[in-house]
Amino acid sequence: MKLILFLLCLLSVFTGHAQAPRDPLFISFDGTKIHYDIIGEGKPVVLLHGFISTSESWKRAPVRQALADAGFKVITLDLRGNGLSDKPHSAEAYDNNAELKDVMALVQYLGITSYDVVGYSRGAILTAKLLTMDKEVRRAVMGGISVDFSDPNWIRRKNFHEALTKPGSHPELQPAVDNAKKAGADTLVLARLQEFQPVTSRTDLGKIKIPVLVVNGDQDKDNGDPQTLVEAIPGSKLVIVPGNHGGAMRTPEFSKAVVEFLTK
């Protein structure tokens, strides 16, 4: 009996250790558990990661620590379906802007009433939609994106969805799919994320009234011309930094542009 109790205790210890890296977690509006991290103290800023990525991408970029050093409370999260957050498979789990509802629920959970947002690539697409949903956002940075996502039939979104659901349909995107599998990403979830990716119309972009900064790498053509996004959002500004789509957000220049913009 003593041996059995010992083994059960040992099992619980190992199970606890296996689950510990997911903390902290919060339970979102529909019961989905979302992993998040916070560093720094001061004005809150939420960082939204891109596609086939997690909040770890921000931890490898200097901008996260630079914001904390500049007096910001920096909040990163693994968007549902990614990283250490839950990965539901149903369509309902991703429909109706569920990811943005998670962000707003997290902000409310943390007792925040006014905050900034920095989104990169798909995270910038989410940022645009968030600006139409939450009046508590003070300033926003959108990196690595053009206005093309405002088209509900955006060919890049459709092609990625097909590449994930119809193997071999888009050879040019196969390396990205292969990398996702190699990294252990859930490709069914990735397909859902493309299927239900938020669309913010040009009309809605034209109604944005808060300050917006658009940042793009000088070698980044992945998601179109960023100048088109600047033209769609009144008063927004464009900063070009060195790097391609994968590298621009990790440059000191990106970090400097974001910190200077958010500290104005």
Image: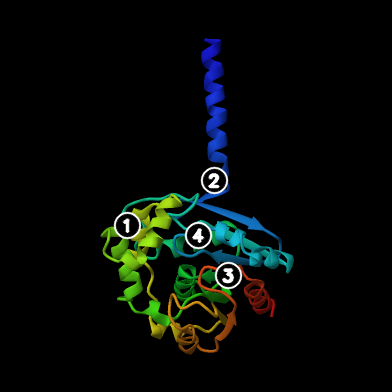
- Which residue is located at x 51 percent, y 56 percent? 78
Instruction: Establish if 135 lies above or below 68.
Output: below
Answer with mark 4 or mark 2, whichever residue precedes in sequence: 2
Instruction: Establish if 85 lies above or below 45.
Output: above
Residue carrying label 4 = 105
Instruction: Establish if 138 lies above or below 85.
Output: below
x%, y% of residue 187?
A: 36, 54
- Which residue is located at x 68 percent, y 78 percent? 260
Answer with mark 1 or mark 3, whichever residue precedes in sequence: 1
Coloring scheme of the render? Answer: rainbow
Give the Cα distance between marks 4 and 1: 18 Å
x%, y% of residue 47?
A: 57, 65
Q: Is residue 56 left or right of residue 101?
A: right
x%, y% of residue 42?
A: 71, 65
Q: Which amino acid does label 4 sit on?
A: Ala
| Circle 4/circle 1 CB separation < 8 Å | no
Could you say which disc has been placed on residue 92 in the image? 1
| Circle 4/circle 2 CB separation < 8 Å | no
Q: In which quarter of the image is residue 164?
A: bottom left
Give the Cα distance between marks 2 and 3: 25 Å
Answer with mark 2 or mark 3, whichever residue precedes in sequence: 2
Q: Which of marks 4 and 2 is in front?
A: 2
Q: Which of marks 2 and 1 is in front?
A: 2
Q: Which of marks 2 and 3 is in front?
A: 3
Give the Cα distance between marks 2 and 1: 24 Å
Q: What residue type is labelled 1?
A: Glu
The image shows a total of numbered marks equal to: 4
* Secondary structure of residue under mark 2: helix
Frontmost residue, 252 versus 201: 252
Give the Cα distance between marks 4 and 2: 18 Å
Could you say which disc has been placed on residue 249 in the image? 3
